[in-house]
Amino acid sequence: MTGSILDRLEEGIVLGDGGYLLALENRGYVQAGPFTPEVTIEHPNALLALHQEFVHAGAEVLQVLTFYASENKLAQIGYSGRLGDINRAAVQIAREAGGESTLVAGDICLTWKYEEGSAAAADECRRLFDSQIGFQMEKGVDFFICETFLHVGEALLGLECARSTGLPAMVTLAFEGPNTRDGKTPAEAAKMLEGAGADVVGANCWQDPGFMLPVLEQMRGAVDCHVAAQPVAYRCTEEEPFFTRSKGFPDKLDSYKLTRYEMGDFAARARDLGANYIGGCCGCEGSHIRQMARVLGKAPSEEREWSVSLDNPQSATEAYKHLRSESD
Ligand SMILES: [Zn+2]
């Protein structure tokens, strides 16, 4: 299947990929805390392998790993001079990992530099976005994902910069509570982004499926354009309603992890609510995407016929089958 992201979305649901930084932190290639993606030049094979895992699991889009690959964030770890190298490498690696029909999405995200009502801060955000976008465009991306914005004001700036390339743009917000930091409901924010020319609007990161689905539902009801949802695969609670404020963040999240079946259920519920682009963010790994692909009827068929013999077991699956409950 070929065609632009907009053609694909017209044909049906598009399955995105999962999260990169937390997965690579687990594997020892990203530092918990700054979460900058110098891995694109320091350990490109680790990133390549993770992209390949997502494609193998059924992902139809690879998002380039340029989250926090902005000049200000890279300066924190002494890599500001490698801004171009890091952004270009991210696109190159995603291209190499993808199949013929895999789309590659460029990526910009929150800068932590935005200040409501400040023209100077807005200019600084634009400058940071434009420099990342310029380096990513040198290698060529298929569309842009502007992600994890806490302020719709900053998301609008990201959208403006992404749209200046002439490529389609998807914008997703991260919610700490019922509203954005600049006080907009999901419905209001989605309308503002659609009005400013976003092709896809939605939510990503911070919240787990249970907290994100109501956000998705509000957005779906407010706009005519495509909607997207990419939640984290870490459990959230009323006390810890988004994962970056949980006691487990940033590096003790193992016990928070959702199962592949919980993410599969999310995919089904998001589909039923009318989502067009469904994927995952932090904590969402290949096993989750694979189950989501199955649920959405997109699973690659790599499963083999297996002749089960309970009388002559050849694996623990058969040997202990009689001791397991059938219910789960
Ligand atoms: Zn995330």
Image (cartoon, helix red, strand yellow):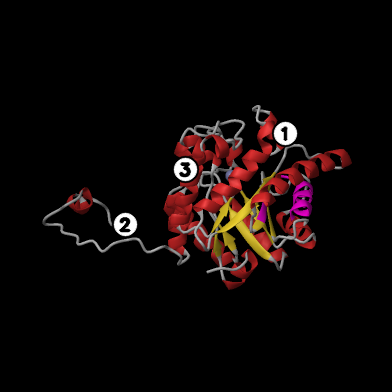
Bounds of the magenta segment: 144-162
Q: Let me know if residue 147 is in the magenta part.
A: yes
Relative to residue 180, is residue 311 depicted above or below?
A: below
Mark 2 and mark 1: span between their CA atoms?
51 Å
Point 62% across, 66% down: residue: 4
Residue at the outermost front position: 138
| Secondary structure found at label 2 | loop
Spatial CA span between label 3 and label 1: 31 Å
Q: Check disc 3 and report its element: helix, strand or loop.
A: loop
Q: How many marks?
A: 3
Residue 72's tag is 1
The answer to whether residue 208 shows anywhere in this view is no
Name the image quarter holding residue 201.
bottom right
Does residue 148 lie above or below 101 as drawn?
above
User: Could you say where residue 248 lies in the image, as x and y percent from the top left?
Assistant: 53, 33
**Quadrant in which residue 206 is drawn:** top right
Q: Is residue 226 left or right of residue 317?
A: right
Give, as a three-letter code, the residue at label 3: Lys
Question: Dot 1: within a 10 Å radius of its alpha carbon, few (fewer than 14), some, or many (20 or more) residues?
Answer: some
Q: Is residue 197 left or right of residue 267?
A: right
Inspect the image, locate mark 2, and give the three-letter code of the amino acid beneath it: Ser
Q: Amino acid at mark 1?
A: Asn
Which residue is the site of mark 2? 327
**Residue 114, position as x, y percentages in the image:** 78, 40
Residue 176: x percent and y percent? 66, 43
